Amino acid sequence: MNIRILVMLSLLVGIGAVLHAIMPPFFLGMRPDMLLAMMFLGIILFPKIKYVMILSLATGFISALTTTVPGGQIANIIDKPLTALAFFGLFIAGRKFVKQNIYAPLLTALGTMVSGTIFLSVILFIIGLMEGSFPVMFATIVLPTAAINTIAMMVIYPVTQGIMKRSQLSASYQ
C-alpha cells in the first residue's frame, strides 16, 4: 500500500469528520453525513478495492463516534462498507462511459441515497429504536443530504482533480 495515498485518504476522513460534527441536525437529531461525500471522493480518486475497504471501515468507525442518532453506531458500521462497495462497483462500471465531472456528482447523489436507505433500514427495522416511518425519514433526511453532498462534490471534485494533476501523488498512483 502506498503511504501517500493512505495519508491523503486519512485527510479526507478527517475533513469529513469535522464537517460531519459541525453540521446542524435536520430531523430527530439526524444530521447530513458530509463524511460520506469525502468517502466517495476518496473512492473516486483511488479506485482500488484495498483502499475502498480501508476507507469505508475508517469512515464507518468515525461516523459511529460522531453520530447523534440512537443506535447510529451500529448502523454506521454496517452502512459505510456496504455503501462503499456499491459505490465502487457503480463507479468502475460507468467511469469509461460518462464524463467524470458529471459522473462524480451523479454517483454521489445515488450513493448517498443507497447509504441512507441502508442506514434507515438498520435503524428502523433491525434495531427498532427510532420512531417514524421510512418514507418520512427518507424524505426529510436522506434527500436533503443527497442534495448537499451532490453540491459539495460539484465544488470539491474539480478542485481536487486540478490538485491531483499537479501533484506527484497522481503520478505515483498511475
Image (spheres, rainbow, N blue to C red):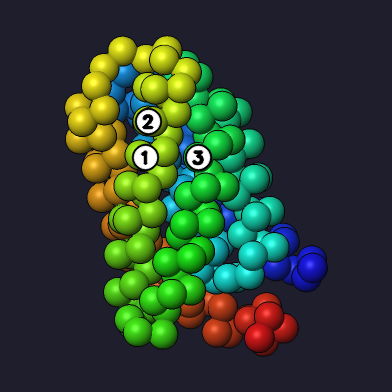
Q: Nearer the viewer, residue 126 or 137?
A: 126
> CB of mark 3 within 8 Å of CB of mark 2?
no
> What's the residue type where badge 1 is placed?
Gly
Residue 70 on image: x %, y %: 47, 16
User: Residue at position x 32%, y 47% from top?
Assistant: 113
Residue 120 tag number: 2
Q: Is residue 66 visible?
A: no
Residue 51 on image: x %, y %: 67, 62
Residue 106 on image: x %, y %: 30, 64
Q: Is residue 170 above or below residue 132?
A: below
- Crowding at mark 3 (Cα within 10 Å: few <14, some 14-19, many 20+): many
> What's the residue type where badge 2 is placed?
Leu
Q: Is residue 33 visible?
A: yes
Q: Is residue 54 above or below residue 27?
A: below
Residue topped by disc 1 = 116
Residue 79 tag number: 3
Q: Secondary structure at mark 1?
A: helix
Gap between marks 1 and 3 measured at Cα:
8 Å
Quadrant the C terminus occupies: bottom right
Q: Nearer the viewer, residue 73 or 82?
A: 82
> CB of mark 1 within 8 Å of CB of mark 3?
no
Residue 59 tag number: none
> CB of mark 2 within 8 Å of CB of mark 1?
yes
Side of 158 relative to 65 (left or right): left
